[in-house]
Image: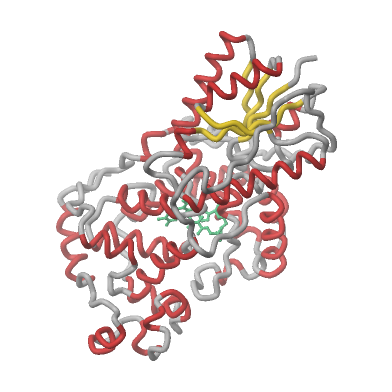
Amino acid sequence: MSPAIVVFTRDLRVRDHPALIAACEAQHVVPLFVLDDALVSGLHVCANRLQFLIQSLADLDVSLRERGAALVVRRGRWVDEVARVVRDCGGDTVHLSDDVSGYANARHDRLRMVGARQGFAVITHPGVTVVPPGAVLTGSGTTYLMFTPFYRRWNDAVWRNPVPAPKRLSLPAGIDLGSVPTLAALTDITPSPELPAGGELAGLARMRTWTSDGLAGYAEAHNDVAADMTSHCSPYLHFGCLSPLEVATRLRDRAGGVAFVRQLCWRDFFHHLLAARPELTRRDLRARGIPSGTEDEAFAAWCEGQTGYPLVDAGMRQLQREGFIHNRVRMVVASFLTKDLDVPWQLGARHFMSLLVDGDLANNQLNWQWAAGTGTDTNPHRIFNPTRQSERFDPDGIYIRRYVTELADLDTAMIHNPPDLERTQRGYPPKLIDHAEAIAHYRTRTAANVSN
Ligand SMILES: Cc1cc2nc3c(=O)[nH]c(=O)nc-3n(C[C@H](O)[C@H](O)[C@H](O)COP(=O)(O)OP(=O)(O)OC[C@H]3O[C@@H](n4cnc5c(N)ncnc54)[C@H](O)[C@@H]3O)c2cc1C
């Protein structure tokens, strides 16, 4: 019997892995990961995600070895390397998880073409979302552009049952395993100093702790930026160290589970939308006039956390330090860039992708569009006042003090909008722009360009 190849991509786990389970029907299985040169090198590499990826691959290797196999690692052109491994081990079937981006789907199509020539089959399986893309459609069979009706249908859809991890795996004899590279072998960019550890084991531990400490209070606390009471499971979901289906299935009936699983539905919503409209990584869903801002000094000040708006600066500095930002603050900084500074969302999205450990094309680009008013927000003219948001969601300035250290001992009464003298004395910048004036300009600009 020919061995089956399971190609891991962003499903770096052994639990609830339908492609792995399907491959296990063969006597021998080759678990393969290819570091795609097009993704791990080049201009837009993110050292934070690479470090998380490397740790996740090492963890996957351990799990596979515990079951009698090991991870086979290659680097190069993804399709060529997969096809080479299939040929070298005499395989006839490749199993892998379905994905949603245009790039991933083009890769799969090319692999199928090579398979047709070389004589192997390519079979894709669910695993990246709770409900597979295309399975939740409007009554007229189209993709939902609004979250709330999507959520209703998604909740009512039949979810598959999570599959258990395989107990035993057997590699074919004589296969060259290769090895997981070091970060230094992939990039000379230094990762952020405070990153979470990658891998299924770390993801499960994170989920266990948070389920007991945070889930029950999630609905009330998820916007409290200082308390930091969200799950931080986004990088584990992005790399598939956690199965979104398994997480949602386990938690939906527990106290706090409904509010939390609703957030997982946002993830599915954007993944489904991107699968149907891959061009949305770059193009507006709803055009609202082209912003005039560019990669100028204002953009640089935003990236560096030097805008003079403490909540915005705290968020941008959290990004640099941890490769993460609280969701509420992501909305505030994105609104500030696109609506106050008039900069195209694509520039902000690119900066986020250069640092976020959970950086994810579907979630990032479509949330940016939501915040910029070009996407799925039913109220595209929503504007976040950075000072009000700070007073409301970080009333004691705890989050601000954590990241904007020059304001750490400032009185709470002043922390959301420090007086000029305090700014000068502490080396904290003046406001880059006046929010009210900037928003008046935004309103004039968009009034002429609204096209729903
Ligand atoms: C401008 C902007 C950019 C973003 N970029 C990303 C990104 O690159 N990757 C990413 O995973 N999320 C992104 N988000 C969504 C959200 O901010 C993060 O998923 C969340 O902050 C991660 O923290 P958590 O795991 O503690 O979330 P929790 O509150 O614990 O939520 C649980 C999970 O639900 C999903 N989720 C929650 N909120 C959203 C949302 N608005 N959209 C989609 N999924 C959601 C995530 O998978 C998250 O891990 C972005 C949001 C904004 C406003």
Give the tally of numbered discs.
Answer: 0
- In the image, taking residue 195 as reference, residue 127 lies left or right, namely right
Dividing the picture into quadrants, the one containing residue 214 is bottom right
Give me the residue at 36% from left, 49% from top.
Answer: 350
Work out whether 82 lies above or below 156. Answer: above
Residue 302: x and y, percent?
30, 63
Give me the residue at 35% from left, 75% from top.
Answer: 310
Quadrant of image for the N terminus: top right
Residue 65: x and y, percent?
78, 40
Quadrant of image for the C terminus: top left
- In the image, taking residue 332 as reference, residue 156 lies left or right, namely right
Residue 254: x and y, percent?
72, 60
- In the image, taking residue 261 as reference, residue 308 lies left or right, namely left
Give me the residue at 22% from left, 62% from top.
Answer: 298
Work out whether 241 lies above or below 84. Answer: below
Work out whether 331 lies above or below 52. Answer: below
Dividing the picture into quadrants, the one containing residue 157 is top right
Residue 128: x and y, percent?
60, 39
Can the viewer see residue 252 in this picture?
Answer: no
Give me the residue at 47% from left, 77% from top.
Answer: 402
